Image (tube, rainbow, N blue to C red):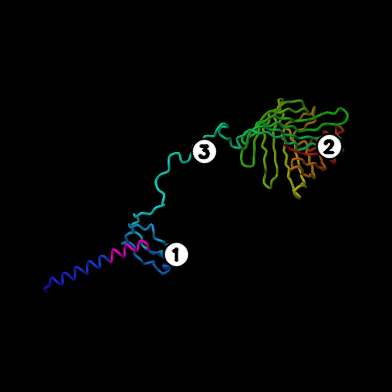
Amino acid sequence: MKISKKNLSFIGLSSLVLLTSSFATAAEMSNMDHSGMDMSGDMSNMDHSGMDMSGDMSNMDHSGMDMSGDMSGMDHSGMDMSGDMPGMQGGQPPADARSPDYSNGVPYGQYGKPMMMGSMPLWGVSVDDLGYQFDEDQINFEATGWYGTDSNRIRLRTEGSAQTKDDKEIDSLSSLAYWKPLSIFWNGEAGVAYDTENDNAAVMAGIVGTAPYFIETDARAYLYTDGQLRLDLGAEYEWRLDQHWVVIPEVGLTAFSKDDHDNGITKGFNEMETEVRLTYETFSRQLAPYVGVSYETALGKARGQRRQENESVDSSSLTAGVKFWF
């Protein structure tokens, strides 16, 4: 087939027109508004592996595009995302972007580094019982003071009774101990103690904490210098009636390892003390006056020994007092 020069000129002119139209179309697409385009159709089988995304798409508006269609099967493996996408962050953060103490390189100033609350040494005083027993005509007391942190403390504790008639004798058991948490609900303590009732010193070790059902429990053992071993067990529960009224039942047991007739002690469990109080908490629950009833009884061989010495085996009394802390 013979092509004339006239035909060649026509073909060349047509190619030039098509090429120019293509460039014009591509230039116009960069500023196209796609806001009205509906992309909700099924595009799961579309193949984008050959698409060239290297152009400048910074001015394209996609705000109105509906992308709610199913695109789970779209293949983007061949898409070229190397184009200009301004606004995206990149690079590695500086070495001092975060510091272990969260200061971010800012100095603490004239007051120095702050201290966590749990590491600050604090102190407190708790008087669990300061009451009068009407039938026994005596004042009972139990108080604890401490100094230290949440993980280490020094505790000074005393409990006993003071007679308000006759010789006004005071019987007390006081201890100075080191206190430390053993677990979430239990704390341990160890130290020295002095008992005025038998005028003897002892080393002490104990466990204090919260048993299941929120029963406050304590167990302390005292080893006296004469070889006597004393064990005190106690339990207390707070039955809250409302925000202020609380019923507190408590029980205590005392046991010894050997007889000591000079001090009215027999081997085994000697005594049980129980009390039920009705308290009213006021002043942010720091002060709680109470009224109640107490009951004491001798156990085991101690009952016979008390009868021989013409002492009461059982006794009960109305009580009134206050408990507070600060």
Query: Of marks 3 and 1, which one's residue comes earlier in the chain?
Result: 1
Q: Label 2 vs label 1: CA separation?
A: 83 Å
Is 119 drawn above or below residue 56 in the view shown?
above
Residue type, label 1: Gly
Which residue is most to the bottom?
1
The residue that disc 2 covers is 132
Query: Is residue 79 or residue 192 the one in the foreground?
Result: 79
**Quadrant of res 162:** top right
> Number of marks in the image?
3
Cβ–Cβ below 8 Å for labels 3 and 1?
no
Residue type, label 2: Tyr
Is 50 drawn above or below residue 259 in the view shown?
below
Q: Residue at x 44, y 64 (%)?
A: 64
Q: How many residues crowd around disc 3 within 10 Å: few (fewer than 14), some, or many (20 or more)?
A: few
Query: Of marks 2 and 3, which one's residue comes earlier in the chain?
Result: 3
Magenta region, residue range: 21-31
Circle 2 or circle 3, nearest the eye: 3
Q: Secondary structure at mark 1?
A: loop
Circle 3 or circle 1, nearest the eye: 1
Which residue is most to the left?
2
Quadrant including the N terminus: bottom left
Q: Position of residue 155 (x, y in %)?
A: 68, 32
As for residue 26 lying within the magenta part, the answer is yes
Q: Secondary structure at mark 2?
A: strand
Q: Which mark is residue 103?
A: 3
**Quadrant of res 302:** top right
Q: Position of residue 273 (x, y in %)?
A: 78, 39
Q: Label 2 vs label 3: CA separation?
A: 56 Å
Q: Secondary structure at mark 3?
A: loop
Q: Is residue 307 left or right of residue 185?
A: right
The residue that disc 1 covers is 64
Magenta stretch: dominant SS?
helix
